[in-house]
Image (cartoon, rainbow, N blue to C red):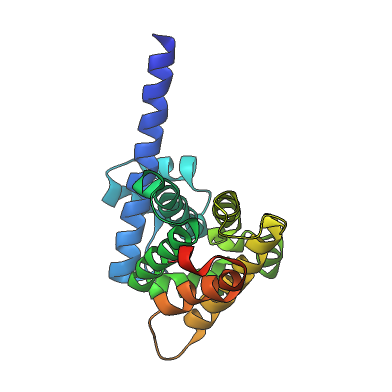
Amino acid sequence: MAELMRGRREQAKLERRERIYEAALNLFREQGYEGTTVDQITRYAGLAKGTFFNYFPTKDAVLRYLGTREIGRLGSNALNNGNGRGSSIGKLKRLMAALAANLEQDRALVSLIFRKGVSAPDLLAGDAGGFSLQPIASLMIRQAQYHGEVNPNLDPDGLAAALDALYLQQLVRWCESSKPYPLTDRLTGIVDLLLLGISSADQAS
């Protein structure tokens, strides 16, 4: 019984966090980040003002959660996609495509994250404001090695770090560009650039 109650409390906490996040994102889109207050966010979410700080220490933290949440959700879907059907490199490219599609919907907010919420130490530490792909990329590259798609003698963490660096470079360039352009080809292309030469061509699609 106690375990059941703890599970329900944890689920309620997750739901409140998501309500706050969704409310903040909607308001950021409608009236801009600077024009949105914590009070407005909690009222929009139907919660008491103090509830916000139980889940996010600052408004900036909501922005940072955008990357963490999307990469975590999409990464989980990619790892479990098709119950193992399809190549691991193909799954990684589909992850990149799905991520690009989501980011393109919120280009202004993503750009704001990199201007306001991501410091040089964040990038050097590999956090990148919650946008780092390195952990999920490392898992997927290990899958590719297990299935013979990538040379098993190569360091998967090193490959993941290189992929992450290329991805973040493209993301920052996209955010800084004065003219928006499709991000999908840029992100899926870096998978080919880094991994195609060390994978089996017939398994990489």
Q: Which of 161 and 58 is in front in this view?
A: 161
Percent coordinates x, y for residue 122 in the rendering:
66, 63
Q: Which of 201 and 145 is in front in this view?
A: 201
Q: Is residue 16 above or below residue 189?
A: above
| Furthest-top residue in this view | 1
Number of marks drawn: 0
Q: Indicate the quadrant where residue 133 lies.
A: bottom right
Residue shown at the point (41%, 50%) measured from the top left: 73
Q: Is residue 122 above or below residue 51?
A: below
- Image quadrant occupied by the C terminus: bottom left
Residue shown at the point (57%, 76%) measured from the top left: 193
Percent coordinates x, y for residue 108 in the rendering:
40, 75
Residue shown at the point (45%, 48%) measured from the top left: 79
148 with respect to 155 (left or right): left
Q: Nearer the viewer, residue 157 or 174?
A: 157
Residue 146 visible? The answer is: yes
Q: Which of 117 and 174 is in front in this view?
A: 174
186 with respect to 132 (left or right): left
Residue 40 visible? The answer is: no
Percent coordinates x, y for residue 24 in the rendering:
36, 57
Q: Indicate the quadrant where residue 158 lies.
A: bottom right
Percent coordinates x, y for residue 85 in the rendering:
38, 50
